[in-house]
Image: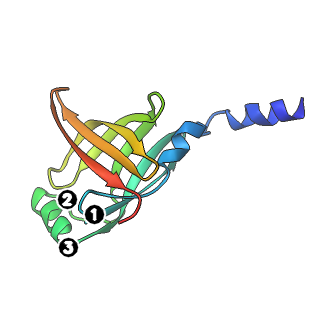
Amino acid sequence: MMLLAFMLLGLSRGAVPPADMALLGRWWNSDGSVAVDVARCGERLCGKVVYAEKKQQDKARRAGVTQMLGLAVMRNFQGAGAGHWKGIVFVPERNRAFRSTITRLASDRVQVEGCMLYILCQHETWKRNR
């Protein structure tokens, strides 16, 4: 009975479902020029830039983004089935947010896809290690 009570408390408001835990941690973009830390943000997941090469920061500045470090580039992500998440991704070099899906490819790789109007999509593979 006590175990059941603890399990129910763990599923209460604010808890990130266990399937979403696989996405927590540091992820590097495909060429290793940007690192994003994914963490819990209330009931959802979000990600902030913790490293960006000068070249990436310059691209973002040209688009109107003054500061990349600490920038929230993943917002409101939640589980959408086994190994899938949906939310909003912000692309600094375009200074725009897009609907996004993340698909787990392996324990150390995910595919991040952003779409505009559901048909114009781009994707990139992120890795846990640079």
Work out whether residue 60 or residue 6 is closer to the camera in this orientation and state it.
6
Q: CA distance from mark 2 to mark 1?
A: 7 Å
- Residue at (14, 50) in percent of width and height: 94
Give the total number of marks visible in the rendering: 3
As drawn, 67 above or below 95? below
- Location of the C terminus (image quadrant): bottom left
- x, y percent for residue 108: 43, 53
- Tell me if I can see residue 51 in this picture: yes
Q: Which residue is mark 2?
A: 65
Q: Which residue is mark 3?
A: 54
- Residue at (82, 30) in percent of width and height: 4
Q: Are marks 2 and 1 in contact (CB under 8 Å)?
A: yes
- Tell me if I can see residue 41 in this picture: no
Question: Dot 3, crowdedness within 10 Å: few (<14), some or many (≥20)?
Answer: few
What is the residue that sits farthest to the front in this orientation?
106
Say whether residue 124 is left or right of residue 6: left
- x, y percent for residue 116: 17, 32
As drawn, 72 above or below 76? below
Q: CA distance from mark 3 to mark 2?
A: 13 Å
Kind of residue indicated by mark 1: Met
- Location of the N terminus (image quadrant): top right
Kind of residue indicated by mark 3: Lys
- Residue at (43, 47) in percent of width and height: 46
- Judged from the image, the secondary structure of the residue bearing numbered disc 1 is loop
Q: Earlier in the sequence, mark 3 or mark 2?
A: 3
Select label 1 or label 3 by which is in front.
Answer: 3
- Judged from the image, the secondary structure of the residue bearing numbered disc 3 is helix
- Residue at (48, 31) in percent of width and height: 82
Q: Which mark is residue 68?
A: 1
Say whether residue 73 is left or right of residue 63: right
